[in-house]
Image: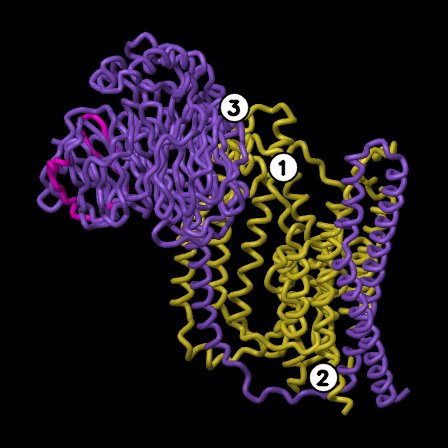
């Protein structure tokens, strides 16, 4: 009976998230018009909200450092899943709902990139620290940021109910997506086009309770998926995860499943909902498989071909990609549909016309941006080609392993596996 | 607390949180339903009060009442906002508690799983991963590569000169001056002006031969007197439209063309006198229009609407203009019948721009090189067959008959910018007829026919000058005009001759009535083609019948007069050439070899016919 009720509750839980979407949409649509007659009341002019006080920004940095320290302490020293869990709850509440998901380390990639390419843009110290500090911590302690200090990770981690294990090939294949996303995010930030990581952050709308309908649907979809495929955003989209993964592979101290020698009890094999535990290498199988040096050399040799293909495709698709830039978009819109100059409802065009800028200047600027995209797209394409090449190469590289170990690059340091380990210190 | 107690506690919390969340969610839905039912923003009472205030602007009591009502509506609105926001937080809170309790419950219930006996075969998995990576990598690169081909670099089409050339008023005046002196037009700079001069090359005066040879001597005086007058008002001249077949049914839409040496014999099957034929990419029932060395037609289907420009000399498709990305245009085209389609209206051109209208309500202008100049969405025409009224241009205006099931109107758009110059609401029902121009009492009139009125409008102002309540049914034929008389007819209605000065009926007849083909009047004769295949010639002055010829096939095309002959195309692609006289004399029957119900265009000794699939040029 109780089981039945609990099963039903599971469905009720799912239903809530759908219901949530209705009033997000609803709150978006309701707007009250101005009165239709003169009342003598003067509408106050809209003002930009004051930025958060600098001291409070530094306070956020301090909180980040404390949370990271605690996460590292719980994962490496205390080996406490409970500690990480409660830290996640705090992170979700503080960096998620209280700080509205901003500033976040994931989005700070774009600030850092723009500061390199836009001489007029000056990155705030806070944004820089939010970018660097988790990377430094990861270099020493593994991805403890993902485990306890990331609000996006926290919201997904807390709703993992019945995780399923994905086959390795699927993990590897989908693992390409964050690299592509990172390349595009860097390209768009470098060209001053858009901060796509922030724009398409599926959870920030939930934190702020004001997302557009399609983003709410996306966020809820991720959460629903996350109940069964744990942390889908972290594993298959997060561009910051790419950097953290690189750092974590070289981490000096990383979480280990066992506090002492592994007794090969295999109790931890299914403990990781993120498929981040590497099993001992079966050397006989490896030798038998034929995935040896010959294939390694083949894949190594074709890496330049992947890069070349990426550069070629990048160069070709720069026109398409550059259309995301507002200036290029506006210039093309005015060229392709000149009649829109007379459309008073097109705010972009009205703003442009009111600015006094000439069409010629706009087109010149758009052409300059497109030229930047030409270079940027080639680099992004080359990077994606390189990643494909190396990922392919990595499938034929076998590391000798005798124990069950967390994959340093993919492990989120959530400490779940440690709970399963019966070995005492 | 032991494990069982914890289990029980988490279960209870989960149940309570679940019930709480469901209740809040239901209340939120109820709130949403209530607000949507009684939207304070669309309050009928408030709208009624505001309307009253417009009539009584000084009624202070009413103002106070409106303010109170408005305040009440605002309070209701902000109250509902508060309810939504508070409800959202409560629901979120409930959902968090529920999720947490469920997690605890499942973790307490969880048993340590048995380790997998057979682990995933890592080698097989890696081989699969290799395939997956190669496929995903290739797909990503292929998609990006494909996107590059599907992308148009509009920046390449930016033309500084054309952007800074202005709206074209100045160039119009300059071009008119050129025509006035009867010499080869000067090139005055700027791309549009160059187009005009290249398209209207050659002296203008000798081209008005038609007027000299015509029985209608009055028309001659019109030409002579109008050309200088139009030079001051701007726009194309009568000489221009007589030289160029720029609209449906030729000059002014009257069906009479001035060109000579028109062939009267050809054969599509053997290729006799077929100079070229070119395939038409998309289907349409519009007829060709001509300016200079270019022929224009349009085609459309559900996926796109297109304008085609062909080289008049060799039939080469010079450019295709796509009518897309028009602000407001529906993503899904309206439902139209097969025999009308989305591209039934013929195009028109003023030598600088070519204009098209489609069944979607999209109007678009391209310059003579295919560069989009402007586009406008008029709203989907509510027409159960599909919009078919052709365009016509005069005095720098694009004139549109927009009679739909939701009411009729005549619209004039600025030819250079697409802005509305005037718009006149007509007391008419839906119509499929096309506008015709005629010079009456020194003014050019736009003459339109629909159920129930035939009416004339001042081209300059849109003012309705006269209107006669005489038509009925689904009006397809446009009017005919000659010698100061307007001829209008429709099947199951009547054929009338009207005096456009006062709208009075001169004579009427109901023996032979056209269904789609327009009446043609010229030189004292009136030609009517019925859909059941009878071609009839009347005395234009009295309505007395001179002759009839039962061809036995459907006649939807409109008759045309060129080179002293009457050209009548039937729906099977057979064009019959008659001597244009009081007596019936069939000169030839010419089979195109392809079905064609459109009306031919004439230029420089050649006939241009749109077949079902091909555009034909017929000449010697």
Q: Please tell me whether mark 1 or mark 3 is closer to you in this view.
A: 3
Q: Residue at left 60%, top 60%?
A: A237
Residue B569, quarter of picture? top left
Question: Marks 2 and 1: which is nearer the front?
Answer: 1
- Looking at the image, which is closer to me, A221 or A418? A221
- The label shown at residue A410 is none
Element at badge 3? loop
The kind of secondary structure element at disc 1 is: loop
Chain coloured purple: B
> Distance from label 3 to label 2 (Cα)?
74 Å
Q: Chain of mark 1?
A: A
Number of marks in picture: 3
Q: Which mark is residue B461?
A: 3
Would residue B50 be found to the left or right of residue B150 on screen? right
**Chain letter belonging to callout 3:** B
From the image, state the color of chain A. Answer: yellow
Residue indicated by mark 2: A7
Residue segment shown in magenta: B584-607
Which chain is indicated by disc 2? A
The residue where tag 1 is placed is A345
Identify the image quadrant of residue B549.
top left
From the viewer's perspective, is B91 left or right of A170?
A: right
**Does the segment drawn in magenta span residue A95?**
no
Vertical position of residue A420 compared to residue B181: above or below: below
């Amino acid at each position: 009976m109780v089981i039945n009720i609990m099963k039903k509750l599971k469905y009720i839980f799912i239903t809530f998230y759908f219901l949530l979407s209705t009033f997000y949409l609803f709150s978006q649509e309701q707007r009250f018009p101005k009165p239709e007659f003169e009342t003598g009341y003067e509408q106050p002019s809209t003002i930009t909200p004051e930025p958060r006080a600098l001291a409070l920004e530094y306070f956020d940095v301090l909180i980040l450092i404390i949370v990271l320290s605690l996460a590292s302490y719980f994962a490496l020293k205390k080996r406490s899943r409970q500690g990480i869990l409660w830290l996640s709850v705090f992170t979700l509440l503080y960096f998620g709902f209280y700080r509205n998901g901003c500033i976040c380390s994931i989005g700070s990639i774009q600030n850092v990139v723009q500061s390199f390419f836009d001489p007029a843009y000056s990155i705030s110290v806070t944004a820089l620290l939010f970018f660097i500090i988790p990377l430094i911590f990861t270099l020493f302690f593994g991805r403890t940021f993902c485990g306890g200090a990331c609000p996006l990770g926290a919201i997904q981690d807390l709703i993992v109910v019945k995780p399923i294990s994905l086959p390795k090939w699927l993990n590897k294949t989908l693992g390409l997506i964050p690299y592509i996303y990172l390349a595009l995010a860097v390209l768009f930030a470098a060209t001053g086009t858009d901060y796509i990581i922030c724009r398409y952050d599926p959870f920030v709308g939930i934190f702020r309770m004001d997302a557009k309908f399609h983003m709410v649907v996306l966020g809820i979809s991720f959460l629903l998926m996350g109940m069964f495929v744990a942390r889908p955003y972290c594993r298959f989209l997060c561009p910051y995860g790419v950097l953290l993964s690189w750092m974590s592979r070289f981490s000096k101290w990383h979480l280990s499943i066992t506090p002492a020698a592994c007794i090969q009890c295999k109790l931890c094999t299914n403990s990781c909902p993120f498929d981040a535990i590497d099993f001992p290498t079966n050397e006989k199988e490896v030798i038998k498989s034929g995935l040896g040096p010959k294939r390694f050399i083949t894949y190594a040799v074709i890496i330049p071909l992947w890069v070349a293909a990426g550069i070629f495709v990048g160069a070709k698709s720069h026109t398409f990609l550059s259309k995301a830039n507002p200036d290029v978009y506006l210039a093309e819109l005015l060229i392709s549909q000149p009649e829109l100059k007379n459309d008073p409802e097109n705010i972009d065009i009205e703003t442009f016309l009111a600015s006094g800028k000439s069409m010629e200047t706009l087109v010149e600027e758009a052409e300059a941006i497109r030229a930047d995209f030409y270079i940027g797209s080639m680099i992004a394409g080359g990077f994606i080609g390189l990643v494909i090449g190396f990922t392919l190469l990595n499938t034929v590289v076998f590391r000798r392993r005798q124990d069950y170990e967390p994959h340093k690059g993919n492990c989120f340091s959530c400490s779940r596996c440690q709970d399963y380990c019966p070995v005492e210190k | 607390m032991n494990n069982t107690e914890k289990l029980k506690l988490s279960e209870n919390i989960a149940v309570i949180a679940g019930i709480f969340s469901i209740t809040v969610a239901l209340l939120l839905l109820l709130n949403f339903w209530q607000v949507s039912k009684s939207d304070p923003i669309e309050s009928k009472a408030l709208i009624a009060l505001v309307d009253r205030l417009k009539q009584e602007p000084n009624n202070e009591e009413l103002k106070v009442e409106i303010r109170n009502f408005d305040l009440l509506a605002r309070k209701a609105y902000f109250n509902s906002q508060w309810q939504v926001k508070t409800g959202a937080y409560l629901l979120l809170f409930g959902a968090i508690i529920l999720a947490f309790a469920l997690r605890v419950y499942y973790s307490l219930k969880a048993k340590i799983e048995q380790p997998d006996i057979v682990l995933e075969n890592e080698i097989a998995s890696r081989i699969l991963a290799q395939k997956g990576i190669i496929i995903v990598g290739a797909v990503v690169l292929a998609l990006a590569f494909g996107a590059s081909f599907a992308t148009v670099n509009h920046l390449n089409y930016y033309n500084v000169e054309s952007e800074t050339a202005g709206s074209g008023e100045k160039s119009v005046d300059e071009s008119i001056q050129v025509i006035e002196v009867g010499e080869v037009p000067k090139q005055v700079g700027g791309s549009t002006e160059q187009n005009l001069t290249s398209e209207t090359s050659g002296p203008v005066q000798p081209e008005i031969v038609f007027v000299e040879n015509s029985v209608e001597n009055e028309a001659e005086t019109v030409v002579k007197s109008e050309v200088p007058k139009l030079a001051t008002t701007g726009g194309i001249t009568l000489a221009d439209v007589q030289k160029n077949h720029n609209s449906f049914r030729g000059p002014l839409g009257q069906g009479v063309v001035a060109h000579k040496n028109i062939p009267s014999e050809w054969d599509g099957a053997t290729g006799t006198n077929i100079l070229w034929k070119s395939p038409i990419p998309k289907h349409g029932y519009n007829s060709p229009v001509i300016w200079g060395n270019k022929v224009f037609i349009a085609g459309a289907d559900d996926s796109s609407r297109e304008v085609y420009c062909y080289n008049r000399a060799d039939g080469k498709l010079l450019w295709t203009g796509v009518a897309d990305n028009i602000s407001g245009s529906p993503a899904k085209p309206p439902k139209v019948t097969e025999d009308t389609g989305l591209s039934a209206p013929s195009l028109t051109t003023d030598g600088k721009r070519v204009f098209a209208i489609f069944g979607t309500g999209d109007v678009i202008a391209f310059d003579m090189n295919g560069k989009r100049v402007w586009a406008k969405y008029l709203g989907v025409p509510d027409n159960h067959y599909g919009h078919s009224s052709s365009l016509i241009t005069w005095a720098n205006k694009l004139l549109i008959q927009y009679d739909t099931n939701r009411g009729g109107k005549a619209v004039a758009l600025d030819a250079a910018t697409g802005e509305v110059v005037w718009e006149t609401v007509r007391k008419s029902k839906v119509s499929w007829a096309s506008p015709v121009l005629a010079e009456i009492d020194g003014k050019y009139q736009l003459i339109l026919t629909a159920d129930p009125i035939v009416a004339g409008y001042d081209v300059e102002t849109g003012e309705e000058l006269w209107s006669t309540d005489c038509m009925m049914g689904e009006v397809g034929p446009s009017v005919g005009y000659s010698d100061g008389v307007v001829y209008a007819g429709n099947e199951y209605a009547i054929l009338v001759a009207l005096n456009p000065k006062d709208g009075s009926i001169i004579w009427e007849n109901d023996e032979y009535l056209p269904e789609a083909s327009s009446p043609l009047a010229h030189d004292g004769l009136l030609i009517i083609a019925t859909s059941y295949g009878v071609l009839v010639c009347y005395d234009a002055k009295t309505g007395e019948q001179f002759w009839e010829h039962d061809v036995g096939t459907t006649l939807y095309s409109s008759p045309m007069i060129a080179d002293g002959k009457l050209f009548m195309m039937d729906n099977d692609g057979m064009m019959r050439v008659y001597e244009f006289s009081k007596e019936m004399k069939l000169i030839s029957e010419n089979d195109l070899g392809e079905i064609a119900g459109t009306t031919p265009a004439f230029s420089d000794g050649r006939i241009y016919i749109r077949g079902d699939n091909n555009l034909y040029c017929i000449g010697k």
